[in-house]
Every structure is written in C-alpha cells, then in structure tokens.
Amino acid sequence: MSDAPVPMPEGDRSLPIPEWLLQLKKVTPARVLVGRAGPAYRTQTYLDLKADHAAARDAVQAELSLARDFPPGFLAEHRLFEVCSRATSKREYLLRPDLGRQLSPEGIERIKDECEPRADLQIFIGDGLSATAVATQVPALLPMLNDQARRAGWRVGRPFVVRYCRVGLLNDVGETLHPQVAVLLIGERPGLLTAESLSAYMAYSPKAGDTDAKRNLISNIYARGVSHDEACRRILSLADQMRRQQISGVTIKEEFTDRELPGSPIPQISTPEAS
C-alpha cells in the first residue's frame, strides 16, 4: 500500500455558469443547476428530494375531510355535500381505477335528490390522487367560478364532492344531471415538485362511453403554476366556447386573446340569450 500523501483539493475548478442559465434557475422550480458531490447529489439536494417524495406519497394516501380541510362556513355557504364512487376504500381506489370512474348507487340517488338537473354549468370536486391539492386550491377557486358564471346569467348547479374519484366519473354525472358543461376539479397525481396541483377536467354534455377525446383539461393550478384568477378565466372561457359550439374534446381549442393573458380581466362570457 502506497504511503504517498493524498492530494488536497485545488479549489472549485467548475466552469462559470452562463448568465442565461442563472436566469433559468430563477424562473423555474425544477431541479436545475443543483450541483453534485462527485457522481452524486449534494447532501441537501438529496434530503430535499427525499422530503418531496415523502410529501407526494402522503398526498396520495391522505383522506379528504370536508370539515377539517375546508374553511369554517365554506360547506354551508356552497351547500357542499359528499358522495362516493364505487370504490369503498383508498386501497381499493388505488388498485381498481375502474371503480373510481363510477358513482355508487347511493351517490346517484343523493345527487338526484340534492341537485337541479340540466344546469348550464355543473361543478363538482373529486379528491383524485391528492386530497392536499383539493384542500389547498378549491376554497379559492370554487367561489370565483360560481360568482363569475352567475354574474353572466348562467344556471349553476349545486356543487358536491366525490370521494375516491377518477376523471371518467364525468360520464356518470352527465348521465345523472344532464348539464350543458360539467367541470371536475380534481387533485393531480403528486410529483416531486408539488402535491398541491389541481386539474379542471371539462366536458360538454358528458355521457356513458365518452373517453378523454371528449374532454378538455386545464392543469397545474397551484401557486407556482396557473393562478386561481387565470384558471377561473380559462375554465369559464372554455365553457363558453363549449356551450356556443356544442362540442368538447379534441375538436375544440382554447381561444387565447389579449384579454386572456395572465393578469387581464376575466373575459365577457355569453349570456343565455346570446348562446
């Protein structure tokens, strides 16, 4: 074994980082330019990665509690009630996605009893794969959607929450209530960036047998993604297009105008007479 001394480090010999890369790091939450220790992450980067992974797993396993997760008075103000899909537990929901796409028989009857059919806009909430996202985003977004749609003269259905919900459940809601446009606010599958991202899935007159080709999606609704104001503007603008053109899915695209850029007012949407 050699007794030669181990050479000491000669300082940081890494190349200077270009200014445009530094600017990129400022505007994205992605893990770029985090550095390395030999062939591995630095310790802090590794610990942050493990913490974010744990948060994502917790969000998937968490159960939504209306009384705990929504602000005081929110349930009464919006007359929210809860039904369930055909999945009877979180475990069954994760192992049997097909059950999360169907309302339970009791849920169908409850919705028929509590909700007015044939609304212009029917919003409902699904826990999806992140109850954390629902608890974080819905209290701000739901009132904005309801208020703006009603101010335009739309008939807005009574909202409700579906436990163990998948996107395909839009079809059962369509068959049960026959709304013009149905909007599902659902927790997105968490990633290593955030567990608080919400999606809005939309469909015109959804019915049994419809696939994702008949649906539209506005995703990434969270603090560092699509803001509540922008999400409200885009959801109602797209719903207005669907009502006017009587279609949804791949045959319709969002109409972006100068008024619909982030920070602009919510665009005027059609009144019942105009549609």
Image: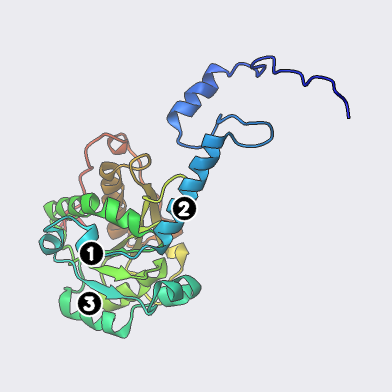
- Under mark 1, the amino acid is Leu
> Which residue carries the number 2 mark?
54
Image-based side of 217 in relation to 152, left or right: right
> Which residue carries the number 3 mark?
111
Mark yes or no: residue 102 visible: yes
**CA gap, disc 1 and disc 2:** 23 Å
- Count residues near mark 2 (Cα–Cα under 10 Å), then give few for <14, some for 14-19, many for 20+: few
For label 2, the SS is helix
- Count residues near mark 1 (Cα–Cα under 10 Å), then give few for <14, some for 14-19, many for 20+: some
**Could you tell me which residue is drawn at 40 percent across and 57 percent down?**
59
**CA gap, disc 2 and disc 3:** 36 Å
For label 1, the SS is helix
**CA gap, disc 3 and disc 1:** 17 Å
Image-based side of 189 in relation to 121, left or right: right
Tell me which numbered mark, 1 or 2, is placed earlier along the sequence: 2
Tell me which numbered mark, 2 or 3, is placed earlier along the sequence: 2
Tags 3 and 1 touching, CB below 8 Å? no
- Under mark 3, the amino acid is Ile
